[in-house]
Image: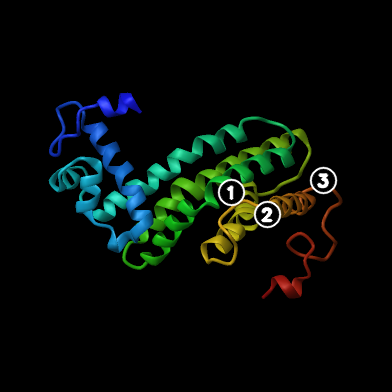
């Protein structure tokens, strides 16, 4: 603490040449808690500039608009947590173990007050700023799906599972194992925390998911689309 107090006070205004990256990081770091606390509309660029030790002009030099700054804040939030998810995906093990570690890491980061607040802002501003939700999807959801797809591909290579469409299976897993608890927390149905019950549910979901891809007999003759009756698939 004494070392921090010894630092000279931050100067407000344009940063020194060569330190523009640091200024951008300071602005984003200052913006995130303000956006999360106040929401997008009520968040003040003046307050963000003051918290970052910069001028309002400097903020608009780095970001073309408040929306641009919020989008950058979303990216920073994702990039802060994604390395942990990627590390868990790289540890190896059975397909079930890999899927559990990836989903657990995602939910640990996502079912938190901060992430829930971010999703609520993106949803509330979806009509005016669809790029917010697109950023969360492209840099979050899509990257998670790729990690899951890679884990499934390794399972197929080992002969543990049989998957015809890896991309579809990966997206499906995200939609049954990760999105539901995240949505329930976003809508206030459940507390924003990864509880023991949620972990148990995740285990059961993974078990059910993988049972559908166990190597086995061919589809029922006369059926369509993995044996489903034609009268259902024709709808």
User: What residue did someone put label 2 on?
Assistant: 198
In the image, residue 65 lies at what x, y percent?
22, 53
In the image, residue 75 lies at what x, y percent?
39, 45
Residue 78 sits above or below residue 175 on the image: above
Residue 192 sits above or below residue 126 on the image: above
Q: Mark 3: which secondary structure?
A: loop
Question: Along the polypeptide, which appears first: circle 3 or circle 2?
Answer: 2
Q: Mark 2: which secondary structure?
A: helix
Name the residue at 63% across, 55% down.
Answer: 172
The quadrant in which the N terminus is found is top left
| 156 on left or right of 59 | right
Label 3 packing within 10 angstroms: few (<14), some (14-19), many (20+): few
Q: Judge depth for marks 3 and 2 and give the one in front.
A: 2
- Alpha carbon distance from label 3 to label 2: 28 Å
Name the residue at 14% across, 27% down.
Answer: 17
Q: Nearer the viewer, residue 170 or 26?
A: 26
Q: Mark 1: which secondary structure?
A: helix
Label 1 packing within 10 angstroms: few (<14), some (14-19), many (20+): many
User: What residue did someone put label 3 on?
Assistant: 215
User: What residue did someone put label 1 on?
Assistant: 107
Label 2 packing within 10 angstroms: few (<14), some (14-19), many (20+): some
């Amino acid at each position: 603490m004494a070392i921090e107090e010894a630092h000279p006070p931050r100067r407000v205004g344009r940063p020194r040449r060569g330190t523009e990256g640091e200024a951008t990081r300071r602005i984003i770091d200052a913006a995130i808690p303000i956006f999360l606390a106040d929401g997008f509309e009520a968040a003040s660029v003046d307050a963000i500039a003051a918290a970052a030790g910069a001028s309002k002009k400097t903020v608009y030099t780095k970001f073309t608009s408040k929306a641009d700054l919020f989008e950058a804040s979303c990216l920073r939030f994702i990039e802060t947590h994604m390395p942990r998810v990627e590390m868990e995906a790289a540890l190896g093990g059975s397909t079930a173990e890999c899927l559990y570690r990836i989903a657990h890491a995602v939910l640990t980061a996502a079912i938190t007050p901060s992430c829930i607040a971010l999703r609520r802002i993106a949803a509330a501003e979806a009509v005016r700023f669809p790029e917010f939700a697109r950023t969360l999807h492209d840099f979050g959801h899509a990257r998670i799906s790729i990690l899951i797809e890679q884990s499934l591909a390794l399972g197929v290579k080992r002969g543990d599972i049989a998957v015809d469409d890896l991309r579809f299976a990966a997206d499906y897993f995200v939609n049954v194992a990760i999105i539901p608890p995240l949505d329930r927390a976003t809508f206030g149905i459940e507390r924003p925390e990864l509880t023991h019950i949620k972990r148990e549910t995740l285990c059961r979901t993974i078990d059910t998911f993988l049972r559908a891809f166990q190597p086995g007999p061919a589809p029922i003759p006369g059926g369509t689309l993995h044996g489903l009756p034609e009268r259902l698939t024709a709808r």
